Image (spheres, grey):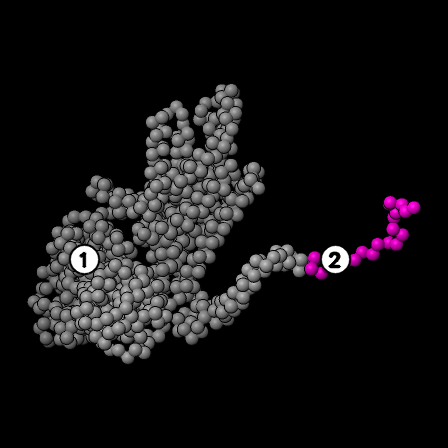
Amino acid sequence: MTALNVAPTDPVVMRAPPIERIGILRWLHKNLFNNWINTLITTALMVLLVILVPPLISWAFINSVWNSTDPQACVEAGGACWAVIAEKHRVMLFGFYPYAEQWRPFLAVVIYLGVLVITALPVFWNWRILLPLWVFGIITIITLMLGGVFGLPVIETAQWGGLPLTMIVFSGQVSVGMPLAVLLALGRRSEKLPILKTICIVVIETMRAIPPVTVLLIAAVIFPIFLPTGFDIDKMVRIVLALGFYFACLQAEVIRGGLQAVPVSQLEAGKSIGLSAWQINWLIVLPQAIRIVIPGLMNHIIQAFKNSTLVIIVGLFDILNATSASVADPQWISYFTEAYLFVALVYFSGAYSLSKYSKYLEKKFKVVSHQ
Amino acid sequence: MRTISFAAVLAVTLTTIVPPIAMSADGDSLKTIQARGDLICGADGKRPGFSAPNSEGVWQGFDVDFCRAVAAAVLGDADKVKYIALSPAQRFPSLQSGEIDMLSRVTTLTLTRAVTLGINFAPVNFYSGTKIMVHKALNVDSALDLNGASMCIPPGSSQERAIADFFRRHNMEYNSVVIDNIKELGDAYLQNRCDGMASFEPGLALTRLRAGQTDDHVILPEDIEKEPLAPAIRGGDDQFFNIVTWVVYATFEAEEWGIDSTNVDDMLKSDNPKIQRFLGVSGDLGEKLGLSNDWAYQIVKQVGNYAEIFENNIGANAPLKLERGLNELWLNGGLHYPPPFQ
């Protein structure tokens, strides 16, 4: 009689798994060659890489010129002319801001980034730190850029350009837009004020139906015609306000989504302890709503960052436009690709940081995720 | 997030407190400019050879030099110019509203613009035109030899019609390759997709420049369409209109008498009464314009005569290497013909 559960008498020899089941081979097999379609795609892409990468490397690194004040060196090398960035960086970064005064926008950008980083860190989320910081930051930046005091020559906004302009247009529209978006979203949800509600709906839907370029053209070209003679609002202010308003209308809908996701019981709980409508919104509904829609909000903020290049249409020289002006120098005109790649890098760092920060905020507030 | 919003509100409040640009829509432009101490000139800002910043951010180019010439005449200092970069859509509103004193931005003079916009055009300072550029390998030196050629043309443009008319008028056939974007149009031509490319002449020169080897392409001499470019000022100010007009003429006149920025000081000693009057050694031509009598001297000394302006920015001494062509003086078969300075 054989026992059903007989322990083996010989010790089991542990054998190594088949070679294609471990390490890199397993990964390759599982992810890249697990069926014939994927095998085909992988092979095709590899062939493509083999064709594309070597010329790219030789263009970008081997035949490239990194440092030269003479475009002739680039003509001879035949590869990428990164020297154009070194040669033209002042115009690219600061546009037509007077050359001798360009330390001012440089300092302004440094202060701006500093203020932004401090504001982003939760350690500093405190009125007593952030309020004075922003007041200081904004006043310093405007004073630096505009001048007219402390012996700084006045530099009109028409001459501002480059990175500081991009930064002002971007932060300006977000700063104008965010509070307005909250108000519009609340207005659109309001039950007790039907007229306000209608106005909010009309404004939001109209603005959402218009392309941003139209908004810019109206602000830059059409609006001044309606102003009384001799009275003018600075073009840059007009444009920042218009873009901010546009941003607000898009953002209001995101926030409305958040507001609707807050359970009614939360409102009722607020009412039951005798809070006013504003208190309920400000203390209970909004904090929860905003947390829910952080990814959506950030999406629009990143878009606002990239949309800031639209000011080219109305002749402002943001970093992109300043770059195309800088490579309009006939000596360097062949090397616009390198210059634009540099600008792409600037935009990528900005947008990527924003998106990483959004991820971080999401985690921090432990927003319920769909995954 | 609450903190951010509040800071945001604050940011808005503070950024809006920016003083508006001083306006001078009506009244005497000359007085305004002299009181201000600067000429505000509208230009393109990214037009190679015409107006673009150099590596130090200093504006340079053909259009820029005419702003500088007016500043030299009016303020005695060619560097006292503030430039405003303008898009095509903005240039006329900007001039009409008084944001700029003078528009010098590759602007074609047409009847409609001259009549309906409330602006005045100074004399044409650059006779440009739609021309055809071909690969040198074709061995063609006249547009009349282009029968059967394929042409890269921007669509829906006056150029497209002008090319069609030109070929029909001369009983020639052509195949058009129509591409919207001027850069892609140039690329298509450079990659040999067409035998020739038709565009505004400086645009052709630019494409040629971008290719690196300027000798491989020939711009054919025939003008397919006229594009006379001229500076413009706001209407209603005859004095300033006269000033800008005669500043343009002065650059021609200086070339006609062989006066340039290097020899102008010697020319002050010339015993030719015409040169003496022109440079303000005798007579009162400047005063008649409301300027100082050495206005023309300042233009030539600080900016140069027309030949210098042309050759240094877009001609032989510049990368664009445009031919003078119609922009020669009348003495050399061109169209620039300054009326007498007397």
Residue beneath disc 2? A17
Q: Does residue B135 appear left or right of residue B4 in this picture?
A: left
Q: Count neighbours of disc 1 (C-alpha within 10 A) and say few if under 14, some if 14 to 19, many if 20 or more.
A: many
Q: Is A9 a magenta residue?
A: yes
Give the magenta range. Answer: A1-21
* B217 shown above or below B87: below
Residue at left offset 34%, top offset 63%: B183
What residue appears at the point 54 percent right and 66 percent down from the top-left corner?
Answer: A47
Q: Quadrant of the C terminus of chain A?
A: top right
Where residue A240 sits in the image (x, y, percent)? 35, 44
Callout 1 amino acid:
Ala
Q: Nearer the viewer, residue A65 or A259?
A: A259
Residue under pointer 1:
B232
Q: Residue A316, image x and y in percent?
A: 33, 52
Amino acid type of the residue tagged 2 in the rendering: Pro
Instruction: Tell which residue pokes out farthest to the right in this image.
Output: A1
Q: CA distance from mark 1 to mark 2?
A: 83 Å
| Residue at the spot 17% in from the left edge and 69% down from the top edge | B169
Q: Secondary structure at mark 2?
A: loop
Magenta part, dominant SS: loop
Q: Classify residue B334 by image quadrant.
A: bottom left
Badge 2 density bin: few <14, some 14–19, many ≥20, Cα 10 Å: few
Q: Position of residue B187 (x, y in %)?
A: 35, 67
Residue displayed at 23% across by 41% down: A226
Q: Check residue B95 for magenta coloring.
A: no
- Left or right relative to A268: residue B54: left
Instruction: Give the camera-side residue of B2 and B216.
Output: B216
